[in-house]
Image (cartoon, grey):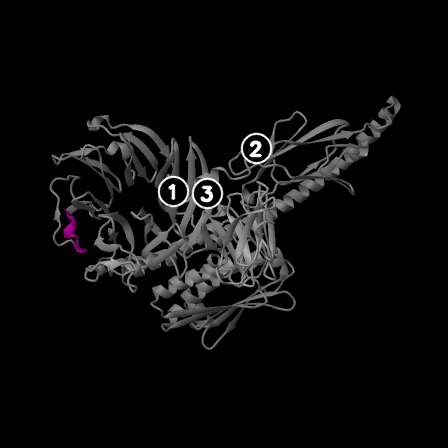
Amino acid sequence: IKGMTNFPIFSIYENKDHSILLGSNDAIYKIKGQNLLETQSIFSGVDSRIRNIFIDKYQNLWFNIWGTKSIYMFSNGILINVSENMALKNIAISRIFCDRDGNIWVGSLGKGLYLFSNLFLTNYISNKESIASDLKRIIKTKDGKLLIGTNDGIALLNPKVKKIWFGKQINEISQYVRDIISINNNEFVFAITDTRLKNQLKQYFIIPNENYKIRYIHASSLWSDSSQIWIGDWDYSVFNCQLGDIQYNRPKIKRNSSLSIGPPQNKRINCFFSDRFDRIWVGGQQDLFISNVESKNLNINELCKNKEVFKISNIDNNKILIVTNQGFLIVTDDADPSKIKPVKQVQIANTTCVAKTGENSFLVGTKAGLIILNNDHQELLTINDGIPGESINDIYFDDSSQTAWVGTSEGMMEFNLDKYNNRSGIYQNIDEIILKQGKDVFVNPNKLNFKYKQNSFSVNYKSFNYGNPGSINYRYKLDDSEWIDAPSTELQFASLNPGEHIMQFSSSNSKGTWGPTKTVVVGISPPFYRTIWFYFASSLALLILVYSIVKIQIRNVKRKQNEKALLNQKIVELQQKALSKNLNPHFIFNSLNSIQHFINAHSIAEANDYLAQFSRLMRLQLNMADKSFIPLHEEVSRLEFYLSLEQMRFEDKLTFEINIDPNIDPYTFEIPNMIIQPFVENSIWHGIMPANRSGHIKLNINLEPGGNLIIEVFDNGVGLDYVKHNKDDKHVSKGIKLITERLQLYDSESIDVLTYQKLQPGTVFKITMTPKMYHLNRQIHTIPQ
């Protein structure tokens, strides 16, 4: 090759244009024919053996460095250390592979298999070292960076190098950001909620290594023009001041007399907007107002009646976008308020933000995920598709790059709309059909012929989609019947009549588009005996036999159905009774009282923390309410949330510890739902609380050599004798009886499912679960990007 001599080559990849990429020491060479076209230096002066080169469907260049245990990607000229971003720095890579859908597979030496799917998304996940979890507001600076307000601080993202910085002015106090505005090229005002900061944030906050000046103000919303700033408050009041007069506690700000939105109320101002007629639009929790220069309140409340207005913005010269909690509407901007009418209305529950991406195309953020709306066709992206959190708070859309920056409840997401629209899998093909007839197996058959007695068989069909396998749906049809939605990937065909039968199968992708039909033709040969005498004799005998068999079968089926119905009914009743005991109403009542106490005491951080813990526990409770079995780690997580809330409520007078046998994998062990919590709750309410001293709860989960799962709940409370002597209801005993009956349904031969033991002080409850009472789920779980 001309221009290449004495270069070691560790990797070879062929491009679609038939050029060749060669991985060498520190550099990648591109050749075509016998000529060297390009040299890409990677690490200057470092001996780095470049291996596993390939280019994915989005033209990103992937490779790994032998010895450094790192995966790298070139994307739009930026070198990204994938291993560092994904916490895979100490994993030796053996192979990188791209499948037909554009997913990236990484094989490691002794550490398993990793899958990077849905590469149209790039997530910046929150953790202790980086950004806070809940991102509230995103704006773009003059130099192309993204300034982000979170529920506890400020973040700055540089999209060019994919680096994000996070910090706050005072580490000890939470800084919940509600809004951000730019008042010149490098000066910004942040609206925050915590009034405790008013004497501590008088100075500018300077982001390290950046020329940005940050000022804070206590407000619910902000807006500014070239000379003044408008400030929305929580009592339905609006203030304004000159830009130079901004201070945290607003000492120089007076209620503006030229803006009328009615008397003060216990409602929040969410947003401002100035239209081309110099009118101020004000969006609140239940109203939308327009105020003109004569201080006349032009109420257009009918447009957003009983709706909370989150944002108002221009979408062209004479149309205005209004985002509410029930969707969004586009209205005309007219000098006559009576002529302001909707030209488009979209109803979407729990809407939080909207970004226009094209003609009749929008991105809609909701509390349940991100909706791609295109000509009224909706596609919903959830955490199953790779987004970090389902609650979307804000969207900044860059039209030039067709990239949306999405702030979620669990971190930042970069969403490339072009890549999403051009992703593979426009159709979802049926990849494999397996027909089984007796001991014979036929893979992807076109046409089969069977004898008369071979007229019953099963058909398995599969379609592969690693990016979102749960989005695939199947349907089938037999002969001239209508398409039928398939409940699973296996069908049973029994006693087909002689003749030719046409079976058709199809699958759909996440867009709901059905792929090509795959057809299998099965011919059933008629029997050789077709004389009238044989028909008469055999029909008579068969009639008697069939009658007897059917009668017996019907009797057996009815008996089994009755037994099964009674058993299912009892299980359902027990589950419903157990679910009704999920969370003690006293606990919910006391939790709400604790939140109210923190708020009344102006302990906003504690209230936020308690409310966040409480809401997470409620979400876990709702997500798991309809499950009979849940993984052990989910039950433990729910207990930790519950005990943490009780610990906060008792002001750290309650301690707890949870110990799990190292031989137990909490992700594969599945136990009946809500088995442990009633005992923990019982220990707190009936053991520790009457003791009038600091309490301690200990939970031990062990696996015996015989396979029994032992769960023990210890407390240092008053003990069983005191409880039995002072107890005035049957709540605990009924709950324990229900749990015992529920477990014995799974293993009727078990004895001593639940035992008690007195301690000095306290009590221990011991639950013995035989292998029939729990499940082992040994499926391999992949880690989403």
**Given the image, on which type of amino acid does mark 3 rest?**
Leu
Q: Which mark is residue 381?
A: 3
**Crowd band around label 2 with a 10 angstrom C-alpha radius: few (<14), some (14–19), many (20+):** some
Which of these two is toward me, 488 or 255?
Answer: 255
Question: Residue extending furthest top?
Answer: 532
User: Residue 525: percent from the left, percent from the top?
Assistant: 81, 29
Q: CA distance from mark 2 to mark 1?
A: 27 Å
User: Residue 68: percent from the left, percent from the top?
Assistant: 53, 63
Q: Quadrant of residue 529?
A: top right
- Based on the picture, tell me whether residue 148 belongs to the magenta stretch: no
Query: Dot 1 corresponds to which residue?
Result: 365
User: Residue 413: percent from the left, percent from the top?
Assistant: 41, 48
Q: CA distance from mark 2 to mark 3?
A: 19 Å
Of the numbered discs 2 and 1, the one sitting upstream in the chain is 1
Query: Dot 2 corresponds to which residue?
Result: 514
Q: Which mark is residue 384?
A: none
Whether 376 is drawn above or below 574: the answer is above
Q: Secondary structure at mark 3?
A: strand
For the question of whether residue 132 can be seen, the reply is no
Of the numbered discs 2 and 3, the one sitting upstream in the chain is 3
Of the numbered discs 1 and 3, the one sitting upstream in the chain is 1
For the question of whether residue 153 can be seen, the reply is yes
Q: Which residues are magenta?
A: 241-249
Which residue is depicted at the point 42% across and 60% down? 641
Residue 498 is left or right of residue 634, and the answer is right
